[in-house]
Amino acid sequence: PLGIAACIAGYTRATHLLSMKLGQERKANAERGLPTITGTLQLYDPDTGELLMIVESVLATMYRTGAAAAVSAKHLARRDARTLSVVGAGQLGRQVLRAVSTVRPFERIYLYDVRPDQVARVVEELAPRVPVPIEAADAEPACRAADVLCTATNSTEPIVRSDWVRPGTHLACMGADLHSKIECEPQLLPRCRLFADNVEHCLERGEVSQAVERGTLGRDCFAGSLGAVINGAVPGRTRADEITLYDAVGLGVQDTTIAKSIYDQASAKGLGLRVRFC
């Protein structure tokens, strides 16, 4: 296939706004000197249907995905978590690292990527923005050391092996948003207490979906959604030695929330170009 196109819509009562995002992936664009992922995020008034804003969506998506990883760590990681490891040093890995590093008093942060030069760039870029120095590490030692382990890649082959993950770890799997993508070895999943951003969606695509399809896990494998944990409807971590795993494929309401933030800030600062369509 030429690539992937996906449309995600979201509405929240808190904002009373509607968003719609169209994202596209074209891996061949790397050979053309073009971005492999592009997209636009639109914000609407649901009462009038008025288009309020159009903004480039890739960076906004990375920010909201990083924030989701941080929320999962806030509610599911051990209180005494002191080591953060991030697998993937692309734009998503950057934002995941920045966000998650704020939710616990981490003493060590490790970053791994198949491209060491990319790790070096991110370490230099984020040095003033994170609380402790970031250390480059290979995948295995980074995973073995982690109290909180975040994956932020577009891999279609497992990177994180089951025997690299110790009891008590929290994993936030943020990169596998399609059925074809996978970041963790399937043998790891039965060891984990599993949570989803949306259970129904994560049974069809994402980290857990392949294990469900193979019969390694049942369709009742998720303890619940992260939202249910936050609302108190489902217990989160139940033991210090429990491995918790947050499987995220992305939610339209997250796009709506960040679009509202961008719109409010741009309006307050007089940024952007106002266009009349009719």
Image (cartoon, rainbow, N blue to C red):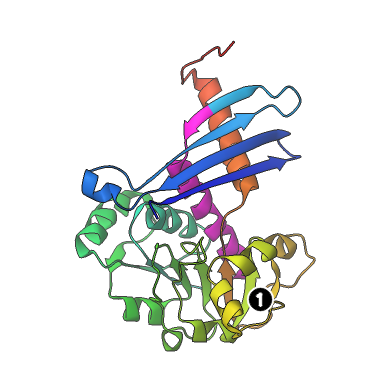
| Foreground pick, 162 / 238 | 162
Q: Quadrant for the N terminus, please.
A: bottom left
Position of the C terminus, as image quadrant, is top right
- The residue drawn where x is 44% and y is 46% is 24
Q: Position of residue 77 (x, y in %)?
A: 57, 71
Q: Residue at the spot x=48%, y=59% of the render?
A: 100
> In the image, is residue 62 part of the stretch drawn in magenta?
yes
Q: Residue at x 73, y 34 (%)?
A: 16
x, y (%) of residue 199? 68, 65
Secondary element under disc 1, as helix, strand or loop, is: loop
Find residue 244 and report its image quarter.
bottom right
Q: Please report the bounds of the magenta region as a residue range.
A: 54-80
Residue 21 picture location, percent across and down = 55, 40
Q: Residue furthest left?
A: 117
Binning the other alpha carbons within 10 Å of mark 1 as few (below 14), some (14 to 19) or many (20 upward) gives many
Q: Residue furthest front?
A: 1
**Considering only vertical position in the picture, is 174 above or below 142?**
above
Q: Does the magenta portion include 4?
A: no
Answer yes or no: is residue 241 visible.
no
Q: Amino acid at mark 1?
A: Arg
Query: Which secondary structure type mostly characterizes the magenta part of the structure?
Result: helix
Is 138 above or below relative to 29? below
Who is closer to the viewer here, 272 or 103? 272
> Which residue does the image show at 49% across and 46% down from the upper left?
61
Q: Is residue 188 visible?
A: yes
The residue closer to the viewer here, 23 or 185, is: 23
The residue tagged 1 is 237
Question: For residue 7, which quarter of the picture?
Answer: top right
Left or right: 5 as drawn, with respect to 221: left
